[in-house]
Each structure stands twice: as structure tokens, then as C-alpha cells.
Image (cartoon, coloured by chain):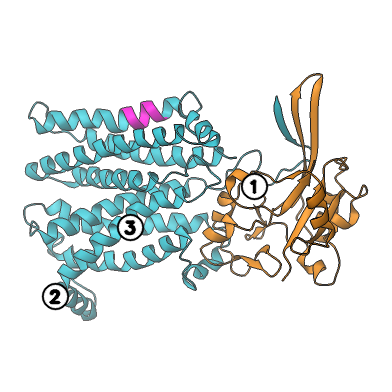
Chain colours: A cyan, B orange
């Protein structure tokens, strides 16, 4: 037997009996950040390939939704801060060793750039759109000239944004479940997949829907591979990580994770997408809804499980 | 430059909790919170049981993960190797709390993160940390780990000791004599 008991009555709020410092705000941001990374990446990619007319949802609608969803995600992050007046402190320094500092600077760079990107596409989505002041028109005209450069920058930044959502968690040695380098790539592909699912809901064009299905099938296959890799890595590591993996292998998150996230959020959508691609099934939005559901649930479960795992 | 550390004799500690109360009083710790606490660590199988009583707190690690992950520089190391939080820079993002394997930090009701300071304000006046000062069994010792003549160095030289979670790689500076 080995039992460690705190006998002086420590009951620090949010720390005891186990860590509960991060609530709905963090997984909400991680979900929206990943989704926006997907929207911006594919919007910029297909813009650079000159497919604006062919794939209007990917290039244009994605561009318009991105800053809106990103702003909501950033607001959720703001709500998480316990000393909100000190928000500006993030931008008084750059701490190279702190993932959160990288994230704060990435977000503050990508938000205005994604707004410019949305402004570039707004008139093609809403033909009757009129800018309230000529200064907006000149900003758009200037951006138009540099649109390829902006697309390239957004592609790189969106990768960092998507990756960061996982790296934020993986940088904590003290929380064994999060402390895996695979979390960055896993959250990136999951983010790309939720972005594609969101675009599937927006797309009205059959060709485009089919293309989204094909790319998404690749990303969720990768996601499944990374999930298996995550657990193999944890199980092959030290005792604290084996205990962390057991939260999902017989522990409290077993059913919710494997049935709802992996089964309903990855495997069933993969089957539906395969059927649609091979012309066996009808065109459906069910796969997209399930992917979004699986994506948000995975982040809620991961944020909670990481706080439950400790030394 | 000094490298402060704390040495706690688990053979002497009776778990009275004076250190906890002294800290709360000295540092005006908000009601319901504590910067140090007592644990009973019981090992073995009845009747062969072994119990270690420890007074625990921030370990002022030499490789502090809380300082590394802080996005604003609020968590920092000062002279003597003491890890402190500058409440004017803290945003309450709680990354440092997630990073601490000892759960030694908490969010102060005013919104910034708070923890043990090794009573840095007392050290400046040449006094010992409040917890060490009040220990009725003289189980707690404080001093410069780099000075071979200091009480803490001598104790560590002559007695078996351990630190908490050495596998976390944080190099703690609170030592427990066994």
C-alpha cells in the first residue's frame, strides 16, 4: 500500500481535489481555432490554385466565416483569464520558451490578416455589399494587389494556429496525458477535418462537396492514426503516462471517447464519406455534423482528462 | 550569490500544522487557501507500516516549468533562486498551475496566481521564512545550498534525503531528510 493524504486540510479552489482550472472556454477555443485553421488553409490553397469560381464555398465562404469564428474563440480565451485587465501583458513581451506566448502573438497576427482576407471576398459573396467609407475600398484594392502574398502567409499561419492548439496542451510535463508531442499534429489534422466539415455544410455545389469528402477522408484517416499513435506512445512510456492512458482504456473516459469521438466522430463519417465518393450513398450532411460533434467533444474530453492526470 | 533551499526533517515533523498557520498569517493568505500543507505518506502492509509526515510547498525548482511556460514573464526567478510571481504582470491564464507537478499554485481571489515565496520579504531583513521560524520541533531548516558551512548543506551531507517527484526533472530545492 502507498497512500498520500493531505492532513492539513488543503482545499485550494480549482486545485483540490483535482485540477479544474480550465473549463469550457479552453476546449471551445481549441475547437474554433482548429476549425479556423482549416478554413483559412483551404481557402488560401484553392485561391492560389485559381479555383475561386469552381469552389466558392471553400475559397469565399470559408474566408468570411474565419475571422468571425476566430474572434469568438479568442473571446472564449479572454473569458478564461482571471485577471482580464492584464490582457495587454501578453503583448508587452515575447517569451520564446512559452507556447502560450507564441499562441498569443499568432492570434493577434492572424486575426487582422483573416479580416483582410474576408474583406477581399465579401463583394463576391454579397454583390450588393457597399463599404461605408472609401478608406475600406482602398484597403481592399491594396490587398487585392498583394492577395497571393497574403494567401501564402495565411497558409503558413493557419498551420501554426492549428498546430498550436495541440502544442498548448502538450507542453505541460506535469500533466502526463497532454505531454505528448503527437498532440500538435493530432489537433492540426482534427482542426483541418472540422474545417472541411464546416465547409461541407456551406457548400451547395456537388463537385465541391465531393472534393471536400475526399480531402476529409484523408485527414480523418490521419487523425485516427495519430490517436492510435498517441496511446501507443503513452503506454510505452513511464508509469504516470501509463496511468494517464488508462483513463481511456477502462477508466472514466473509455466509453465517451471510443464510442462518441472515435466511433461516431471519425469512423462513421469515414464510412459515409467513402460511400458518397464511390457513388453508393446519397449526398448527406450527416458526416459533416458528426465530425464537428466529434471534434468539439474530443477537445472537451482531452482538456478534462489532462487535468485529471498528474504525478 | 546564494542558492536558497529548505531541508525538512521527517523524523522530527509531527504534522502539527504550525507552519501552515504561520504562513497564512505572515503572508495574508486568503481564507480557504494555503501556500503550504502537511501530507501523511503511508507505505507498507499492516502491521509493517511506515509513515512519513511532510510539510510541502513550492519547491522553488532549479528547472521551473512554471517560469518556462509563463507567457508574460510574471513567473520569474530572483536572486537566491527563488521563484516568484509578479502580480502586476499576471493575466491569470493558469498555464503555470497546469505546469506545476506539485500543485503548489492557486489563483488568488483577486485574479493573479499566488504561491510560496520562501518569505522573500523576511529574508531581505535577515529573518527566516515564517514556517521555519515557528516549527516547534525544529524539523525545518533554511539556508544557502552553495555554502558548504550552512546548516542545510551539512544536513544534506550527513543524512539520507529525497525530493518530491525527481522524475519530473524540475530539480526541486526542498529536501526531506529520512
Q: Position of residue A92 (x, y in %)?
A: 49, 73
Q: Nearer the viewer, residue B149 or A11?
A: B149
- Position of residue A114 in the picture relative to residue B73 (left or right): left
Circle 3 is placed at which residue position?
A160
Q: Is residue A251 above or below residue A44?
A: above
Q: Nearer the viewer, residue A244 or A73?
A: A244
Label of residue A145 in the image: 2
Task: State the SS at label 2.
Answer: helix
Q: Which residues are magenta?
A: A257-263
Residue plotted at (20% across, 39% down): A218
| Mark before the other along the chain sequence, 2 or 3 | 2
Task: State the SS at label 3.
Answer: helix
Q: Return the chain for callout 1.
A: B
Residue A18 in sight from this viewpoint: yes
Label of residue B103 in the image: 1
Q: Kindly indicate whether the residues beneath marks 1 and 2 are on one polypeptide chain.
A: no
Separation of marks 1 and 2 at Cα, in angstroms? 53 Å
Dominant secondary structure, magenta:
helix
The answer to whether the residues at label 1 and label 2 have Cβ atoms under 8 Å apart is no
Q: How many marks?
A: 3
Separation of marks 3 and 1 at Cα, in angstroms? 30 Å
The C terminus of chain A, quarter of image: top right
Where residue A116 sits, quadrant-wise, is bottom left
Amino acid at each position: 500500500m502507498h497512500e498520500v493524504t493531505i492532513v492539513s486540510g488543503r482545499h485550494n479552489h480549482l486545485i483540490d481535489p483535482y485540477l479544474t482550472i480550465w473549463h469550457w472556454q479552453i476546449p471551445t477555443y481549441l475547437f474554433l481555432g482548429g476549425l479556423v485553421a482549416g478554413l483559412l488553409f483551404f481557402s488560401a490553397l484553392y485561391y492560389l490554385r485559381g479555383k475561386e469560381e469552381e469552389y466558392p464555398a471553400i475559397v469565399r465562404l470559408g474566408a468570411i466565416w474565419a475571422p468571425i469564428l476566430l474572434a469568438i474563440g479568442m473571446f472564449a480565451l479572454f473569458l478564461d483569464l482571471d485577471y482580464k485587465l492584464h490582457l495587454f501583458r501578453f503583448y508587452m513581451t515575447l517569451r520564446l520558451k512559452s507556447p502560450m506566448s507564441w499562441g498569443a502573438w499568432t492570434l493577434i497576427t492572424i486575426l487582422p490578416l483573416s479580416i483582410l482576407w474576408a474583406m477581399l471576398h465579401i463583394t463576391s459573396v454579397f454583390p450588393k455589399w457597399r463599404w461605408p467609407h472609401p478608406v475600406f475600398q482602398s484597403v481592399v484594392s491594396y490587398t487585392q494587389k498583394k492577395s497571393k502574398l497574403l494567401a501564402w502567409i495565411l497558409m503558413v499561419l493557419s498551420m501554426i494556429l492549428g498546430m498550436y492548439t495541440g502544442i498548448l496542451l502538450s507542453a505541460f510535463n506535469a500533466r502526463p496525458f497532454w505531454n505528448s508531442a503527437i498532440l500538435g499534429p493530432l489537433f492540426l489534422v482534427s482542426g483541418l477535418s472540422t474545417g472541411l466539415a464546416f465547409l461541407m455544410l456551406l457548400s451547395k455545389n456537388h463537385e465541391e462537396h465531393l472534393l471536400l469528402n475526399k480531402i476529409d477522408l484523408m485527414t480523418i484517416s490521419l487523425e485516427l492514426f495519430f490517436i492510435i499513435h498517441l496511446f501507443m506512445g503513452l503506454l510505452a512510456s513511464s508509469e504516470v503516462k501509463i496511468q494517464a492512458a488508462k483513463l481511456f482504456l477502462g477508466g472514466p473516459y473509455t466509453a465517451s471517447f471510443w464510442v462518441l469521438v472515435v466511433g461516431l466522430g471519425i469512423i462513421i463519417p469515414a464510412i459515409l464519406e467513402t460511400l458518397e465518393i464511390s457513388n453508393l450513398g446519397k449526398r448527406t450532411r450527416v458526416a459533416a455534423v458528426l465530425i464537428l460533434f466529434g471534434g468539439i467533444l474530443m477537445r472537451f474530453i482531452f482538456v478534462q482528462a489532462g487535468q485529471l492526470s498528474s504525478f | 550569490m546564494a542558492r536558497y533551499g529548505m531541508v525538512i526533517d521527517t523524523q522530527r515533523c509531527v504534522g502539527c500544522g504550525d507552519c501552515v498557520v504561520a504562513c497564512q498569517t505572515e503572508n495574508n493568505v486568503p481564507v480557504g487557501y494555503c501556500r503550504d500543507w502537511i501530507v501523511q505518506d503511508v507505505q507498507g502492509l499492516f502491521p509493517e507500516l511506515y509513515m512519513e509526515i511532510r510539510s510541502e510547498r513550492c519547491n522553488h525548482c532549479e528547472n521551473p516549468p512554471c517560469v518556462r511556460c509563463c507567457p508574460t514573464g510574471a513567473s520569474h526567478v530572483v536572486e537566491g533562486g527563488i521563484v516568484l510571481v509578479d502580480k502586476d504582470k499576471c493575466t491569470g491564464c493558469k498555464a503555470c498551475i497546469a505546469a506545476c507537478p506539485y500543485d503548489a499554485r492557486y489563483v488568488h481571489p483577486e485574479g493573479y496566481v499566488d504561491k510560496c515565496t520562501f518569505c522573500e520579504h523576511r529574508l531581505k531583513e535577515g529573518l527566516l521564512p515564517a514556517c521555519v521560524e515557528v516549527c516547534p520541533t525544529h524539523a525545518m531548516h533554511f539556508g544557502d545550498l552553495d555554502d558548504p558551512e550552512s546548516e542545510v548543506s551539512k544536513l544534506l551531507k550527513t543524512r539520507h534525503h529525497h525530493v518530491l517527484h525527481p522524475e519530473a526533472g524540475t530539480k526541486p530545492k526542498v529536501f526531506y531528510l529520512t
